[in-house]
Amino acid sequence: MADLGTDHVSDVPVVVVGGGPAGLMLTHLLARAGVESIAVDTRTRHEIETTHRAGILEAGAARDLVETGVSDRILRDGHEHEGTELRFDGRAHRIHFKELVGESVWLYPQTDVFIDLADARARDGGTVHFGISDTEVLDIETDHPRVRFTAEDGARHEIRARYVVGADGSRSMCRDLVPEGRRHRFAKEYPFAWFGILAEAPMSAPELVYAQSEHGFALISQRTETVQRMYFQCDPDEDVDSWPDERIWETLQARVAGEDGFRLKEGPVFEKTVLRFRSFVQQPMRWGSMCLAGDAAHTVPPTGARGLNLALHDVKVLADVLTRALGTGDDAVLEEYQPRALQRVWRAQNFSYWMTQLLHTAPGTGDFDHRRQVGELDNVVGTRAGRTYLAEQYTGWPTRES
Ligand code: DHB
């Protein structure tokens, strides 16, 4: 019987808090393995769809979307990139991923990954509650955890499950449920942020351009033939309203300028956001009947676009572990999750940190620091070992099987 104040009670093996790409990919993979689950999110579908995030998927993640039947839209609307460009000292240097490590990456915005997953869940009859409020996650230290919430239509729900997954992003409420004395939070702050824009303009380059200059970092990315995504390093407290289009273009042009005369193709800017970032990991990634996945457990600075790829890797491992734990009734299987996920998490933490410090100018750095940084960049592009290192890290690592 429903509790007082509860209109709907459901019973499923897994309830997922978070309906972003990590949460939805997990419910999709579980459904394929015959495990029923429900996902919930405080944001509406529209809010998630219109929050612009990164745009690079590892080839393995792109293959997973296609081969597990989410969608093959990435093959039509995405762009395969066999390399990327590093620009410094006013010159361009291409890193040819395919030639160096036999892999490529796909330019396909995270919002499109989300749309494909949300459509696939709807098509396959999966239950996702968007726009919920009053979320409570209860009894995770028992083997019958529950999630209670108010749905968008005002109805009160309770979902009873065997396992809860916290895939509720970088402001996760689930991760706070691990008792303070039993969790460790590793964190690093950076003295800069990214100013991200979307502009109506033709493409300026066929692949991504990561630019280091004495004026600071800039990243030239793309969305479509007519919409471009670009970022430049800024102060974390920067106010977007003090940046008219002219000032934005002047800043970007100065950061990519060089002896080859490279110029960005300009156009009206229709979206401006300051993205603050930090490095963060919470361990353990499992507590009782709850596992954390994606940004809820770890966030990386955006340089190198590891965040979504890491989240998709977590849920791939988690789907396997949860399916086996439920199939055998053996909780101990869950102990495999953290070691299998965490190796990649710390590799990606290192890579994101490394690529950030390689390309950004920290306030107060002098001419020695700048020349040393150019020396490091020269080592990266000018030696086969350096190029291979970047290519291997950028395109991802193989999944550890157990
Ligand atoms: C994009 C974002 C990133 O952080 C990155 O490293 C590459 C591309 C993007 O939004 O396209």
Image (cartoon, rainbow, N blue to C red):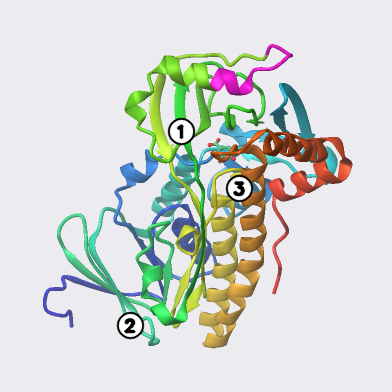
Q: Residue 182 appears at what percent x and percent y?
A: 45, 81
Closer to the observer: label 2 or label 3?
A: 2
Give the number of the disc on residue 195. 1
Q: Residues at badges 3 and 1 in contact (C-beta under 8 Å)?
A: no
Closer to the observer: label 1 or label 2?
A: 1
- Judge from the rendering whether residue 292 lies leftward or rightward of residue 324; answer left or right: left
Q: Residue placed at 61% from the left, 18% from the top?
A: 204
Q: Residue placed at 30% from the left, 51% from the top?
A: 43
Q: How many numbered badges does the structure rendering display?
A: 3
Q: Say which label, 3 or 1, has the lower sequence index.
A: 3
Residue type of the residue flagged with mark 1 = Phe
Q: Residue placed at 79% from the left, 40% from the top?
A: 380
Which stretch is magenta?
252-261
Spatial CA span between label 2 and label 3: 36 Å
Give the number of the disc on residue 360. none
Q: Residue 29 appears at what percent x and percent y?
A: 53, 62
Give the number of the disc on residue 139. 2
Q: Does the Cβ of the disc 1 residue fall within 8 Å of ligand 1?
A: no
Q: Residue 348 appears at what percent x and percent y?
A: 64, 56
